[in-house]
Image (cartoon, rainbow, N blue to C red):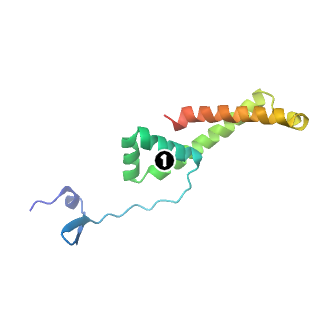
Amino acid sequence: MEKSLFEQMSGTYTQVEDYLLPNLILLEQQDQSIGVWGQRHARYLKQHHKIIYMNLLASGKLNDYLVDIENQAENLFLQLVKQLTESENITEELKAKDQMEWVAQMNNVYNRAREIVNSKLIFI
């Protein structure tokens, strides 16, 4: 009987009752936590780019990819918040003088920064 491609590549099987199951070993992966940005991107890939998601999952690279996206998104978000607060002159003085105005302006900045990160990194 001709060997399967799996057997030609040194793969082995274990017989369980009437079935031959391949002996597969997963590569060791570092357990790195994935934050909100990585989870959003994973959900987006799973819903809209299933082939890319499955390829990353099958190759064992999904977690590393999502950790990288998480880091990029968090850095971009913090950079945008800093730039926007400086350009709009949202300072500690404003916070001490009028807290409600400061909160409103910071919420505005956070929302805009979140939308930019979503459009540039997460939902692409």
Relative to 78, say whether 30 is above or below: below
Q: Is residue 116 left or right of residue 103?
A: left
Q: Type of residue at label 1?
A: Tyr
Q: Callout 1: few (<14), some (14-19), or many (20+) C-alpha neighbours within 10 Å?
A: some
| Res 49 quadrant in image | top left
Q: Quadrant of residue 86?
A: top right
Percent of width and height locating residue 77: 65, 38
What residue is pinned by disc 1?
65
- At horizontal 37% and vertical 52% (from top left) the residue drawn is 58
Q: Regarding mark 1 in the picture, which secondary structure is present there?
A: helix
Q: Which residue occupies the foreground of this view, 104 or 124?
A: 104
| Observer able to see residue 91 | no
Say left or right for 102 vs 60: right
Residue 60 lies, with reference to residue 109, above or below; the image says below
Q: Residue at x 72, y 30 (%)?
A: 84
User: So how many labels did they put on this image?
Assistant: 1
Extreme residue toward the left, this view: 1
* Residue furthest out toward the right: 97
Q: Is residue 53 left or right of residue 93?
A: left
* Relative vertical location of residue 24 with respect to residue 79 in this rendering, above or below: below
Q: Position of residue 26 (x, y in %)?
A: 38, 61
Q: Quadrant of the N terminus?
A: bottom left
Q: Residue at x 49, y 51 (%)?
A: 64
Work out which residue is located at the far front of the displayed protein and give it. Answer: 100
Q: Looking at the picture, does residue 8 appear above or below residue 18?
A: above
Quarter where residue 116 is shown? top right
Query: Would you say residue 79 is visible in this rendering?
Result: yes
- Horizontal placement of 72 versus 97: left or right? left
Residue shown at the point (41%, 45%) measured from the top left? 53
Q: Where residue 3 appears, x then y in whole percent?
A: 14, 60
